[in-house]
Image (cartoon, rainbow, N blue to C red):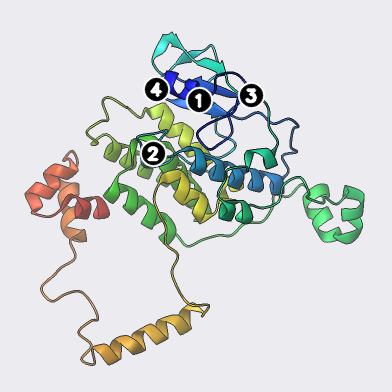
Amino acid sequence: MPTLLSHYPEPGGESDIGWQAPTYIVSSGTGLHLYYFLKEPIALTPANAKGLKEFKFALIDMVWNDDTSRLKDKQMQGIYQGFRVVGSASKLGSRFPVTAWHTGPRWTIPELMVGMDIYKRRDLPPLLDRITTPLEEAKEKWPDWYRRRVVDGQEPDRWHVKRDLYDWWVRRLMREGMTYHHRYFCVMALAIYARKCDICEQEMTRDAYRVWERMRQAPDYREHPFTEDDLHAALTAWRDQYCTFPRDTIASMTAKPMTPNRRNHRKQTVHLARARAVQNIDDPEGKWRGRPVGSGNKKQLVRDYVQNHPDASPTQIARELGISRPTVYKYM
């Protein structure tokens, strides 16, 4: 902390580390948080909220580097992330209250962009220049929208996705686990995908407890526990308004990259037909189809064992059946 403060000898002083001085630096007990206060408030319209989120991600990407943190996985947190009130108890207890240091002035968005990579600045959506349509004018332009949203009070429509996406995310969490600083957002993403895929709350909660059990196997879990209250707090994202979270945002917040499927602008049916045609040329005998010879699906084997031994742990099941723990997690 003294080293970081030495870069800002007085509030508003010049920084020597390549980015603007935060208005306050806050210690929450186990970590440091940089607070940038704006000179003027920004209306939190849906369009501005998206722009501010992307701007905050770019700011975190600039500030979080090898000189400021030993953690390689950056914590990309949205603009609605809660924080501990200065003066309240920190994570270490009431003996160590949350403490703040005044280190810089208030800023404008353009001022905070100074020092930001030119390509990141170019890709950021514009802020403060959004043109909003007055409600009376919107009533004339879009009468159907006005009736549904304003008169009838209907919620905005959303996409309904096949449950394959949800099942894939649960399998991934069970197989890969979660890094300490991203556990909350991994469970939050589980709730978001459950809502997108129309998974009922009971099934989502049951799977969340499986994920929680997976967390508890981490070597550092006793030192950094994830409580049942934390689990239920993350599951409150099971709401329609969270369904608009894009893939890139979830990937950043969970530290789990998601590479999009490449179709080269073709429809899925055309893309798959071309891929199979190439495969048939490479392997005219068709040996590439199906499971490898001699292999078998362990699904029924695992489920039969779980039914007969409901209290068995994943490690015990893997040992008894002679299979890997990821295979056990996949079919439990």
Q: 280 or 320, which lies in front? A: 280
Query: What residue is drawn where x is 82% and y is 51%?
Result: 131
Relative to residue 93, is residue 224 drawn left or right? left
The residue pinned by badge 1 equals 7
Position in image of residue 170 (x %, y %): 36, 51
| Of the image marks 4 and 3, the number of the one nearer the N terminus | 3
Contact between marks 2 and 3 (CB within 8 A): the answer is: no
Q: CA distance from mark 4 to mark 3?
A: 26 Å
Instruction: Tell me, yes or no, whether the two marked residues, 2 and 1, touch with CB atoms within 8 Å.
Output: no
Judged left or right of residue 215, residue 232 is right
Reading the image, the residue beneath label 3 is 12
Quick one: label 4 or label 2, which is nearer the N terminus? 4
Residue bearing the label numbered 2: 66
SS assignment at label 2: loop
Q: CA distance from mark 2 to mark 3?
A: 24 Å
Give how far across and how far down residue 56 sits, in percent: 58, 41
Mark 2, other Cα within 10 Å: few <14 / some 14–19 / many ≥20: few
Q: Nearer the viewer, mark 4 or mark 2?
A: 2
Residue identifier under label 4: 30
Could you tell me which secondary element the residue under label 1 belongs to? loop
Residue sitting at 41 percent across and 12 percent down?
93
Mark 2: amino acid = Asp
Q: Amino acid at mark 1?
A: His
The disc, 3 or 1, on the residue closer to the chain's N-terminal end is: 1
The answer for how far apart the CA atoms under marks 2 and 1 are is 16 Å
Q: Amino acid at mark 3?
A: Gly
- The amino acid sitting under disc 4 is Thr
Tell me the crowding category of disc 3: few under 14, some 14 to 19, or many 20 or more residues within 10 angstroms, Cα based: some
Quote the CA–CA distance across marks 4 and 2. 18 Å
Q: Calculate the distance from the C-alpha at mark 4 to the C-alpha at mark 1.
A: 21 Å
